[in-house]
Image (cartoon, helix red, strand yellow):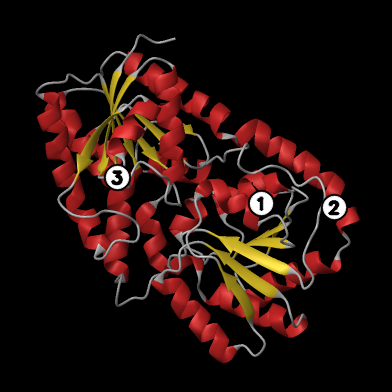
């Protein structure tokens, strides 16, 4: 084990409770750092009950409280652009009293601050990229995300490790690692760690007890790239082919989701749905128990191709058949897995894959389900995944400068 480190952990998301997307990972990474005896200072937006969170996790919180920050906050994108500069100041101020031995950034937004801090504080920096954040903007409306601007932001995000000469990079996928290498960052300083799940919170369904009519489930943060033409056309196709099928949306009712559901109600005769509203991470699995198929109908973009989509992992872990568009990273890992079927980037083809699962007797795939679940539990449960990640962080911190 490496000598104990004083680590500054930087993130643009509230540290606790996890709010969806990549936010859950931070808790498990920090938990593993603390377990090994490292002193962890978390710089993040203000959270509720901070004192108790500090006591329970053994960390020191440094809250940003100038304005609310979350994935659902108003003017979110503008706040994301300016937050790194305030975050940088917070760490510099704290470093006057506390000498940090390592900086770890979570996501691209805090990576901007970490890169600038490497020069100011002269300490090793590890950047962790649970996604290619700006790459998701390719599927946003052009008036909201002009294509030349999105391309420039994505190039900047990919350049961050080489631009600042950081000491190590962790990525959500091999696909994203390849992009950093193409931009000139040494492959030997990159560790693809994928994206995990908590096996204790997503138990395997020993017996399938689906509802009749069938329930098709999707969970997540419901941003624009989750709910595009592919999702809409797939739902229309399935509703026509199988009247009565229910589509369950597990997660906060965002503006994107409300707009999607309103349009579907008007344009898809017989469309039936359930919308749960926000569900804590620990309770998501309850909404998968009686479902028939889990879906990931993401549109094609650089961001989605680089993502290692947690939904697929959690569906497989729960013993739930899944359909996904052919995202490079997730297809690379699950190609050949009997529980995951990949459609084309086409709504009707995606809908056909859903119908294929509904037409198949569960007895034909349940044996394969247990083997698939055992594989993801062994490889992608947060605990082994975070042990591997913190091993890498410790090795990076111990490496001689330069």
At 56% from the left edge and 86% from the top edge, which residue is drawn? 265
Residue 256: x %, y % from top left: 43, 73
Residue 2: x %, y % from top left: 39, 10
Within 10 angstroms of label 1, few (less than 14), some, or many (20 or more) residues?
A: many
Please name the residue that numbered disc 2 is placed on.
365
Please name the residue that numbered disc 3 is placed on.
47
Which is nearer the eye, 147 or 44?
44
Q: In which quarter of the image is residue 186?
A: top left
Look at the image and tell me whether residue 198 can be seen: yes
Pick whichever of labels 2 and 1 is earlier in the sequence. Answer: 1
Label 1 vs label 3: CA separation? 29 Å
Within 10 angstroms of label 3, few (less than 14), some, or many (20 or more) residues?
A: some
At 52% from the left edge and 79% from the top edge, which residue is drawn? 261
Residue 177: x %, y % from top left: 45, 40
User: Which quadrant holds the N terminus?
Assistant: top left
Q: Residue 277 carries which label?
A: none
Please name the residue that numbered disc 1 is placed on.
315
Label 2 vs label 3: CA separation? 43 Å
Pick whichever of labels 1 and 3 is earlier in the sequence. Answer: 3
At 45% from the left edge and 57% from the top edge, which residue is drawn? 302
């Amino acid at each position: 084990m490496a000598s104990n480190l004083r680590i500054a952990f930087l993130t643009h998301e509230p540290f606790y409770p996890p709010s969806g997307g990549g936010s859950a990972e931070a808790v498990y990474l920090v938990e593993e750092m603390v377990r090994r005896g490292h002193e962890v200072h978390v710089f993040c937006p203000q959270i509720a009950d901070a004192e108790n969170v500090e006591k329970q996790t053994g960390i020191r919180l440094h809250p940003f409280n100038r304005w609310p920050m979350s994935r659902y906050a108003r003017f979110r994108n503008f706040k994301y652009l300016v937050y790194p500069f305030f975050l940088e100041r917070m760490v510099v101020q704290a470093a006057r009293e506390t000498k940090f031995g390592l900086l770890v950034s979570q996501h691209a937004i805090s990576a901007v601050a970490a890169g600038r801090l490497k020069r100011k504080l002269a300490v090793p920096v590890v950047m962790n990229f649970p996604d290619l954040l700006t790459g998701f903007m390719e599927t946003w409306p052009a008036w909201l995300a002009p294509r030349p601007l999105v391309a420039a932001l994505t190039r900047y995000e990919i350049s961050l490790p080489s631009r600042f000469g950081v000491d190590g990079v962790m990525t959500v996928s091999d696909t994203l690692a390849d992009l950093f290498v193409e931009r000139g960052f040494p492959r030997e300083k990159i560790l693809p760690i994928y994206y995990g799940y908590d096996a204790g919170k997503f138990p395997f369904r020993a017996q399938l007890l689906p509802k009749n009519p069938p329930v098709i489930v999707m969970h997540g943060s419901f941003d624009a790239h989750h709910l595009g033409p592919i999702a809409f056309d797939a739902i229309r196709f399935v509703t026509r082919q199988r009247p009565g099928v229910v589509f369950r949306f597990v997660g906060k009712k965002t503006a994107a989701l409300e707009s999607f559901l309103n349009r579907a109600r008007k344009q898809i005769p017989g469309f039936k749905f359930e919308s749960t509203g926000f569900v804590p991470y620990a309770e998501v699995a309850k909404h998968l128990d009686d479902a028939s198929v889990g879906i990931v109908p993401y549109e094609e973009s650089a961001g989605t191709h680089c993502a290692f989509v947690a939904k697929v992992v959690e569906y497989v872990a729960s013993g739930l058949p899944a359909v996904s568009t052919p995202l490079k990273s997730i297809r690379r890992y699950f190609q050949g897995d009997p529980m995951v079927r990949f459609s084309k980037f086409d709504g009707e083809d995606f809908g056909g894959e859903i119908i294929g699962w509904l037409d198949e007797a569960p007895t034909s795939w349940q044996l394969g389900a247990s083997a698939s679940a055992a594989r993801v539990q062994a490889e992608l449960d947060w605990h082994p995944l975070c042990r591997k990640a913190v091993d890498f962080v410790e090795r990076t911190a111990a490496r001689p400068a330069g």
